[in-house]
Amino acid sequence: MTAYLIRRCGTSVIILIGISIFIFGLLHLVYPSPARAILGPKASQLAVTQWNQQHGFAGSVYVQYWHYVDGVLHGNFGYSFKLNQSVSSLFAERWMLSAYLSGVSTALAVLIAIPLGIYQAVRRNSIGDQFLTSVTFTAYAMPDYLLYMIAIQIFALTLKVFSTQASSSTNLVTVAGDFHDMTLPILCMTLLILAGYSRYMRSAAMDTLAQDYIKAARAKGLPERLVLFRHLMRNACLPVITLIGLSIPSLLSGNLIAEYVFNYNGLGLLFYDSLSNEDYPVLLAYTLVGAILTVAGNLIADIALTVADPRIRLIEQH
Amino acid sequence: MSNLTPEGGEIGPVRSGWRLGLREFMHNRLAVVGLVTLVFFVAFCFLGPFFYHSDITTANLTGTNAGPGAGHPLGTDDEGFDVLGELMKGGQASLEIGFLSAIFAIAIGAAWGAVSGLAGGLLDSAMMRVVDVLLSIPFLFIVLIVSLRYGASILSLSLILGMFTWLVPARLVRGEVLSLKTRDFVLAARSAGATRWRLINRHLLPNALSVIIVNVTFNIADAILAVSYLGFLGFGLHYPNLDWGDMISDGINYLLDGYWWLIYPVGFCIVATVMACNFVGDALRDALDVRLRRRLTRRC
């Protein structure tokens, strides 16, 4: 198992290096140097060249790449000249809000998806199963923003139970206590994540249901409740671990749309504002952070899976 | 009909796998509904404008945001354009981008996966690490950045989307090729002196075709959704071009005014098209996967 973990971490490091090359390459291509943004459009070419040399934006691509990686490893993700603030400090102000929104939604989605998937697998092709399948299929095909708009229309404009916008506070405690403003974004995101998860949960539960140990548990006379709870649920939950790790990129994109529609001060809205400002350092830094999170998420999911599932450990040993 | 029939049904002419797949597909109700929906939307968007004439290039400021009524079955938007006409035009862009990007994605993905799987060894690992790297990057972000910097047109959006959606097909095709290349017919072709190019072209890719076709449909669905996100955020196509996402993005400004015809018809088009693609894809997967194929021979 140790050998597997070392190999798995090694691959992650290689992927991270690849990601840094890709992001740096793209940054170099779309935004070679911030000199113009700082010195102004009237600065002479000489001044621009001089500034570039002083700040590590001159010389060969390799040297510049090294500067970039060196900066990232020291927590320097670049500088937003449009907002006159370092990217790290921008992220530090906002990441908790985004983490709260997607964290709560993902947790809720997992908590609902597991029993729902088991119910659908056990009562396969019943009316309840078909109803749930059509709901999740529709939500799966629906663009996020359309669901938000329908929800706003129903719950905020017609019934007036929740507000049309998310909390505008930057304080996490205030935001978390603000159910009037936060319920709608969280519930909508939960439904969207759930739509992806429950399809997997249903088929995972169906696969598990066909296993011999379920038959054995039933044959020895174990009450159905215990069969489902002890044998089916614990085994059918395993794919969810991988699924959470894999869903990080779509979670980040989902955050972008949700924060834009509900005007919520998280990283997604920062990304949208930076698009409007053409603030490339922020855009690529966030993309880099997203990619690093994805790699880390997949690694953690794989490790968690080896811990949770003894069968994987056995295969590794033989 | 009783004693003489051998167990397992009558022995008839052997049908080809494709024909069995087609039959299986046609037996799937959702698949047929999906296919009909897709055909309907393609006809609606591309043939519709020949029968339904509307002016969607000159603004008509005397008739803005009018509800559905005579002359405008789905009302007009904030510039007085006919919504039904815009639906057709926007649908053309969305569908074209969906199909084109799926074709790009599949072409790159199939080639990459086939070469990687056949080569094996170091080249294979290197090529798959490239896939891993690109899969870790949230692709909507990159598409937004590139479309912001270089502008968006139907071709450029299809190319960008294609460049970031070939990864899953590449993995799947590689998996197919890995299992195919140890089969006897591939060994036979090899020993007969087939070149690598011929192996990929004549033996490996045709046998991986079912995986490829299934993925095209899912890629189309994903691309239509992705492009609608771009349009919604305001970084998609620009006037006089538009896509379905653009239209919803305009409509959101009038959510408070209750101009439902600016949002729900186009929303329905997106959801129906994407759902239809998903239904067709699921059904194709069931129909073309031999292991999943139901026995359709009649038992006596």
Image: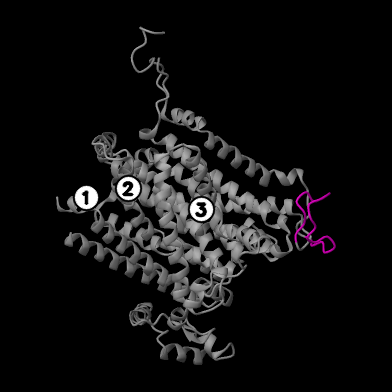
Q: Are marks 3 and 2 on the same chain?
A: no
Q: CA distance from mark 3 to mark 2?
A: 36 Å
Q: Which residue is mark 1?
A: A311
Task: Report in which chain the residue with disc 2 lies.
Answer: A
Q: CA distance from mark 2 to mark 1?
A: 20 Å
Left or right: B137 with respect to A154?
A: left
Task: Tell me, yes or no, whether the highlighted magenta stretch contains residue B73.
Answer: yes
Residue B196 makes an appearance in the image: no
Q: Main secondary structure of the magenta part?
A: loop
Between circles 3 and 1, the one closer to the viewer is: 1
Q: Which residue is mark 2?
A: A229
Q: Secondary structure at mark 2?
A: helix
Task: Report in which chain the residue with disc 3 lies.
Answer: B
The residue located at (68%, 60%) in the rendering is A158
- Residue A155 x %, y %: 62, 61
Amino acid residing under circle 1: Arg
Amino acid residing under circle 3: Asp
Q: Which residue is mark 3?
A: B222
Q: Secondary structure at mark 3?
A: helix
Task: Please say if B93 is above or below B202.
Answer: below
Task: Please say if A185 is above or below A277.
Answer: above
Task: Tell me, yes or no, whether the highlighted magenta stretch contains residue B76.
Answer: yes
- Which of the pair B217/B174 is nearer the observer? B217
- Residue B69 x %, y %: 81, 50
- Which of the pair A175/B20 is nearer the observer? A175
Amino acid residing under circle 2: Phe
